[in-house]
Image (cartoon, helix red, strand yellow):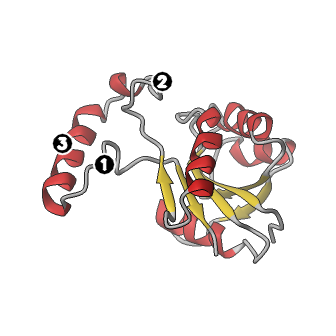
Amino acid sequence: MIRSSLAVVVAAYNEEEGIVPTLCELKEVLNQPSLLVVDGNSSDRTLELAKDLGAEIVIQRGKGKGSAISQGLDQLNGDTSYVVLTDADYTYPAKHIKEMICVLDSNPEVGMVLGDRFSKKYKKESDRNQFYVGNRILSFAQRVLNGIKLSDPYTGLRLIRFE
């Protein structure tokens, strides 16, 4: 059970290449947050590496990322105010999470802030990603269907108010 005002839930499956830099950067930038890695039965060293870095580990029962996130959220308790949901592949720079927390702190009516891989300020290698064109098309479709402009609705970085 995670007991912290800021918890990070990391969905992981065969991410031995990305798990170490992801967790190290989260720990450094967020000043030792509670880290929970939900592992989807990885066959590589993901689990071992996450344990070595002090993350709490949960072995995923179901399949898919949604199941991992749900199972991770079930591990949190009433002490948790904010939850960072992120991927283990080191796609999302943790330095932006503090900005996301400021958005929630200053806007009590807002319940979730999304990372944006396509923002110039946020960009890492997203435009070279094999899914870039598909993500842009889906973002446009999302905007047309829902009338809400989200440049990266399928982002793997989210900060949610946990009440």
Residue type at mark 2: give it. Lys
In the image, residue 109 sits, relative to residue 13, either above or below, namely below
**Label 2, label 1: how far apart the Cα atoms are:** 18 Å
What residue does disc 3 label? 137
Residue type (three-letter) at the residue carrying disc 3:
Ile
Q: Earlier in the sequence, mark 2 or mark 1?
A: 2
What is the quadrant of the N terminus in the image? Answer: bottom right
Quarter of the figure with residue 159? bottom right
Q: Determine the CA span between mark 2 and mark 3.
A: 20 Å
Residue 58 % position (x, y)? 72, 64
Q: Which mark is residue 110?
A: none
Give the vertical position of 3 relative to 94 (above or below): below
Q: Which circle marks residue 124 in the picture?
A: 2
Q: Amino acid at mark 1?
A: Leu
User: Are discs 2 and 1 less than 8 Å apart at CB?
Assistant: no
Residue drawn at point x = 59 percent, y = 44 percent: 14
> Where is residue 158 drawn, in percent x and y?
52, 52
Report crowding for label 2: few under 14, some 14 to 19, many 20 or more residues within 10 A (C-alpha). some
Dot 1 lies on which element? loop
Placement of the C terminus among the 4 image quadrants: bottom right
Q: Which percent across, then down, holds residue 97?
A: 62, 42
Q: In the image, what residue occupies the spot 49% across and 53% down? A: 113
SS at mark 2 in the image: loop
Please state which of residues 13 and 20 is positioned toward the viewer in this rendering: 20
Dot 1: few (<14), some (14–19), or many (≥20) neighbours within 10 Å? some
Mark seen at residue 150: 1
